[in-house]
Image: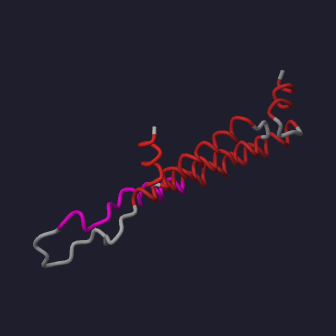
Protein backbone atom coordinates (compact mmCIF):
# COMPACT_ATOMS: atom_id res chain seq x y z
CA UNK A 1 0.00 0.00 0.00
CA UNK A 2 2.87 2.36 0.81
CA UNK A 3 4.46 1.57 -2.55
CA UNK A 4 1.22 2.51 -4.31
CA UNK A 5 1.06 5.86 -2.50
CA UNK A 6 4.71 6.58 -3.29
CA UNK A 7 4.16 5.75 -6.95
CA UNK A 8 1.11 8.05 -7.06
CA UNK A 9 3.04 10.92 -5.48
CA UNK A 10 5.72 10.59 -8.17
CA UNK A 11 3.06 11.10 -10.86
CA UNK A 12 0.67 13.84 -9.75
CA UNK A 13 -0.81 14.13 -13.24
CA UNK A 14 -2.32 10.64 -12.93
CA UNK A 15 -3.72 11.50 -9.51
CA UNK A 16 -5.30 14.65 -10.97
CA UNK A 17 -6.72 12.61 -13.86
CA UNK A 18 -8.30 10.09 -11.50
CA UNK A 19 -9.70 12.80 -9.23
CA UNK A 20 -11.23 14.69 -12.16
CA UNK A 21 -12.68 11.49 -13.59
CA UNK A 22 -14.22 10.46 -10.27
CA UNK A 23 -15.53 13.96 -9.62
CA UNK A 24 -17.22 14.05 -13.02
CA UNK A 25 -18.74 10.61 -12.51
CA UNK A 26 -19.97 11.63 -9.05
CA UNK A 27 -21.69 14.72 -10.46
CA UNK A 28 -23.21 12.73 -13.30
CA UNK A 29 -24.59 10.01 -11.04
CA UNK A 30 -25.80 12.01 -8.04
CA UNK A 31 -27.47 15.05 -9.61
CA UNK A 32 -30.92 14.86 -11.16
CA UNK A 33 -30.70 18.07 -13.17
CA UNK A 34 -29.86 17.40 -16.82
CA UNK A 35 -27.56 20.43 -17.14
CA UNK A 36 -25.59 19.32 -14.07
CA UNK A 37 -25.30 15.84 -15.58
CA UNK A 38 -23.88 17.41 -18.74
CA UNK A 39 -21.38 19.36 -16.66
CA UNK A 40 -20.29 16.10 -15.03
CA UNK A 41 -19.87 14.43 -18.41
CA UNK A 42 -17.91 17.44 -19.64
CA UNK A 43 -15.55 17.10 -16.67
CA UNK A 44 -15.08 13.39 -17.46
CA UNK A 45 -14.27 14.18 -21.08
CA UNK A 46 -11.88 16.94 -20.00
CA UNK A 47 -10.09 14.53 -17.67
CA UNK A 48 -9.52 12.13 -20.57
CA UNK A 49 -8.09 14.98 -22.65
CA UNK A 50 -5.88 15.94 -19.71
CA UNK A 51 -4.68 12.34 -19.51
CA UNK A 52 -3.83 12.25 -23.22
CA UNK A 53 -1.94 15.54 -23.01
CA UNK A 54 0.11 14.55 -19.98
CA UNK A 55 1.02 11.12 -21.31
CA UNK A 56 2.05 12.60 -24.66
CA UNK A 57 4.42 15.14 -23.12
CA UNK A 58 8.11 14.35 -23.33
CA UNK A 59 10.76 16.64 -21.90
CA UNK A 60 13.48 17.72 -24.33
CA UNK A 61 11.92 16.00 -27.37
CA UNK A 62 11.34 17.48 -30.80
CA UNK A 63 8.77 17.09 -33.57
CA UNK A 64 8.94 13.84 -35.56
CA UNK A 65 10.15 15.43 -38.80
CA UNK A 66 13.23 13.90 -40.40
CA UNK A 67 15.51 16.54 -41.91
CA UNK A 68 16.89 15.76 -45.36
CA UNK A 69 20.33 14.19 -45.38
CA UNK A 70 19.97 12.64 -41.93
CA UNK A 71 21.15 9.05 -41.82
CA UNK A 72 20.48 7.83 -38.29
CA UNK A 73 17.47 8.78 -36.17
CA UNK A 74 17.13 8.08 -32.48
CA UNK A 75 13.47 7.38 -31.70
CA UNK A 76 13.77 8.59 -28.12
CA UNK A 77 14.55 12.12 -29.38
CA UNK A 78 11.11 12.52 -30.95
CA UNK A 79 7.62 13.00 -29.55
CA UNK A 80 4.94 10.49 -30.47
CA UNK A 81 2.28 12.44 -32.44
CA UNK A 82 -0.52 9.95 -31.71
CA UNK A 83 -1.59 11.42 -28.33
CA UNK A 84 -1.75 14.87 -29.92
CA UNK A 85 -3.96 13.62 -32.73
CA UNK A 86 -6.20 11.77 -30.28
CA UNK A 87 -6.45 14.92 -28.17
CA UNK A 88 -7.60 16.99 -31.14
CA UNK A 89 -10.13 14.32 -32.04
CA UNK A 90 -11.37 14.15 -28.45
CA UNK A 91 -11.83 17.93 -28.34
CA UNK A 92 -13.90 17.88 -31.53
CA UNK A 93 -16.03 15.00 -30.23
CA UNK A 94 -16.43 16.79 -26.88
CA UNK A 95 -17.71 19.98 -28.49
CA UNK A 96 -20.06 18.11 -30.83
CA UNK A 97 -21.43 15.95 -28.01
CA UNK A 98 -21.99 18.95 -25.77
CA UNK A 99 -23.75 20.88 -28.54
CA UNK A 100 -26.11 18.06 -29.39
CA UNK A 101 -26.86 17.30 -25.75
CA UNK A 102 -27.56 20.94 -24.93
CA UNK A 103 -29.97 20.99 -27.86
CA UNK A 104 -31.71 17.91 -26.50
CA UNK A 105 -31.87 19.39 -23.00
CA UNK A 106 -33.35 22.57 -24.43
CA UNK A 107 -36.01 20.55 -26.24
CA UNK A 108 -36.78 18.56 -23.07
CA UNK A 109 -37.28 21.82 -21.18
CA UNK A 110 -39.59 23.18 -23.89
CA UNK A 111 -41.71 20.04 -23.88
CA UNK A 112 -41.84 19.16 -20.17
CA UNK A 113 -41.12 22.52 -18.49
CA UNK A 114 -38.47 21.04 -16.21
CA UNK A 115 -34.88 19.87 -16.27
CA UNK A 116 -35.25 17.59 -13.25
CA UNK A 117 -34.97 13.95 -14.22
CA UNK A 118 -37.61 12.74 -11.74
CA UNK A 119 -40.19 15.34 -12.86
CA UNK A 120 -39.67 14.50 -16.53
CA UNK A 121 -40.06 10.76 -15.80
CA UNK A 122 -43.29 11.44 -13.86
CA UNK A 123 -44.71 13.40 -16.81
CA UNK A 124 -43.78 10.57 -19.17
CA UNK A 125 -45.87 8.04 -17.20
Asked if residue 19 is positioned above or below residue 121 in the image, the reply reads below
Q: Is residue 88 magenta?
A: yes
The residue segment tinted magenta is 74-92
Magenta stretch, overall SS: helix
Residue at 83%, 25% in the rendered image: 124
In front: 104, or 15? 15
Name the image quarter holding residue 63. Answer: bottom left
Residue drawn 46% across the image and 49% down it: 8
| Residue 67: x %, y % from top left | 20, 77
- Which residue occupies the extreme right position in the image? 113
In the rendered image, which quarter contains the N terminus? top left
Residue sitting at x 14%, y 76%: 70
Query: x%, y% of residue 31?
Result: 76, 38
Residue 111, quarter of the rendered image: top right
Answer left or right for 60 relative to 68: right
- Whether residue 47 appears in magenta in the rendering, the answer is no
Is 78 rendered above or below residue 41?
Answer: below
Relative image position of residue 108 (x, y in whole percent): 80, 39
Q: Quick check: 60 left or right of 16?
A: left
Q: In which quarter of the image is the C terminus?
A: top right
How far across and how far down the image is residue 41, in percent? 64, 45
Measuring 70% from the left and 42% from the top, which residue is drawn there?
Answer: 27
Amino acid sequence: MVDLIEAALRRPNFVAFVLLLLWGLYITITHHNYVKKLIGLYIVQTSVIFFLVTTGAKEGATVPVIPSGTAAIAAEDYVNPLPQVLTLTAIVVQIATLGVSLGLVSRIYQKYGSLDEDEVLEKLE
